[in-house]
Amino acid sequence: MHSIRGRRRDRRWLAAGIGLTVAVTGLTACSGGGGDTGSEGTDTAEGGEAASGGGEAGCTNEIKVPDAEQVTVWAWYPAFEGVVDLFNESHDDIQICWSNAGQGNDEYTKFSTTIEAGSGAPDVIMLETEVLPSFIIRDALTDLSEFGADEVQANYSEGVWEDHSANGGVYAIPVDGGPMGMLYREDIFQEAGITAPPATWDEFATAAQQLKDSGSEAVMADFPTNGRAFLQALFDQAGSEPYVFDQDNPTDVTINLDDAGTKQVVDYWFDLVDKGLVATDDAFTTDYNTKLVDGSYAVYLAAAWGPGYLSGLEGADPDAVWRAAPLPQWDASNPVQVNWGGSAFAVTSQAKNPEAAAVVAKEIFGTEEAWKIGIEEGALFPLWLPVLESDYFRDLEYPFFGGQKINQDVFMEAAAGYEGFTFSPFQNFAYDKLTEQMFAAVQGEKEPEQAVEDLQDQVVEYATSQGFTVN
């Protein structure tokens, strides 16, 4: 199942200019860890008037140089105001006017409305990497190769840069990523006699049974039917390659959502569900957040932003002992690293001054000082190599994990091994249907493999109705 990992996915299909309006609703935000909606910024900032050229009315930050060119930005990054202030303090000619137009789907819905209206979009927008195709195909984003994107390309790995590029163009500047690992309760493991974190999925299942047999009140983990990108990452690790596009005929697409890798994963997890070894709670609800920290789950399978999300939750068990370990593998001798989440800054097609907007996209997270805010206050995982490969980031100790250097131990290796993933321009529709099918299977309405096959049929039908030729 690992033979496909070395193949680079081609994204030149995006230049086709397919005349489709592809839905972007229903996405659960990943970069920040959940689906909670951020508040909108509507107050005019002290020291400056509301910026023109789209975006929410007013800024939530202070404009440091009122006479400078203002660039409107929509973003929901945690601790972002400090990063904005740093940029504005160091730029006399450009100032960021930032507002939070909502997190994830809330923002995307508003952006879609501005696309249809032809006005009202911000100059720069935070987007999760997986939704880029949905907006590129609608001509909603600006090709940054015309505005000096090559000047910063060396600051990113080849795979990361490719994930934000299409047909020779660059449509977003990467910010953070979501390489995956396993966060676990060492104290719960020890009480159950589990002496080491499982390195393989076979060991994970064995440990889950051992945990149950010990009489622990905890289950091993959660398998959320609304896991969306989380579930897709698990499928990817098992060798699934759901979308393949023909670079010579970009309106053609091969859809393989019911492949062997996906079926292997759902069979594995539903076996754990049937044995009562894992929960099936919806992710990122109040109840789920409580269970993450009160000892209901012994393991949180998480992206690199997960430690920040976890440590920021209220109601944590004061006796909890958290540690981080690599994500379990199907084959320990041939590990496959996967990603959950990640985001970037794109310049919208409605930007009043694309050149100034591109400066913001390229430079806002382009300093070590900015990244220290993002890492230490926002728990972001940097894709910016000068920090990602630094001694500072490698050796950073995390008090929540008992001083463990979780970047060095887990997430840096996971990031280095990630080879990219092809998202479709109908990714959100596919995620919505994945949620429906997994829920139906959990409810016993159909067998898991039948749910996967029904997902395949639904997405093929949708893609065909949107003008694609499905092979």
Image: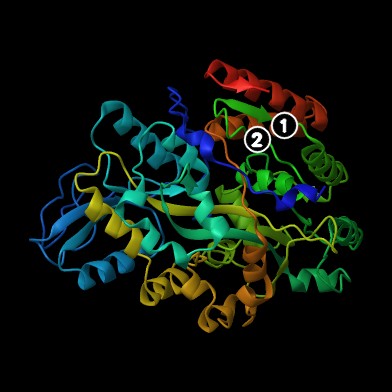
User: Decide: marks 2, 1 in contact (CB < 8 A)?
Assistant: yes
Residue 339: percent from left, percent from top: 62, 54
Which residue does the image show at 28% across and 71% down from the upper left?
A: 86
Q: Amino acid at mark 2?
A: Val
Tell me the residue at 67%/70% (across/down).
410
How much space separates mark 2 and mark 1, taking CA atoms?
8 Å
Position above or below: 35 against 80: above
Judging depth in this view, the residue of 303 and 155 nearest the camera is 155
On screen, residue 450 above or below 203: above
Disc assigned to residue 256: 1
Task: Name the N-terminal-most of marks 2 and 1.
Answer: 2
Of 254 and 292, nearer the camera is 254
Residue 266: image tag: none
Q: Amino acid at mark 1?
A: Asn
| Other residues around mark 1 within 10 Å, as few (<14) / some (14–19) / many (≥20) | some
Q: Residues within 10 Å of mark 2 (few under 14, many from 20)?
A: many
The image quadrant that residue 449 belongs to is: top right
Q: How many marks?
A: 2
In the rendered image, is residue 433 in sight?
yes
Q: Tell me if 114 is positioned left or right of 453 in this view.
A: left
Badge 2 is on which residue?
Answer: 244
Q: Residue furthest top?
A: 465
Q: Residue furthest front?
A: 248
Q: Is residue 26 visible?
A: no
Q: Residue at x 85, y 64 (%)?
A: 333
Name above or below for residue 453 compared with residue 1: above
- The image position of residue 87, as x and y in percent, is 27, 68
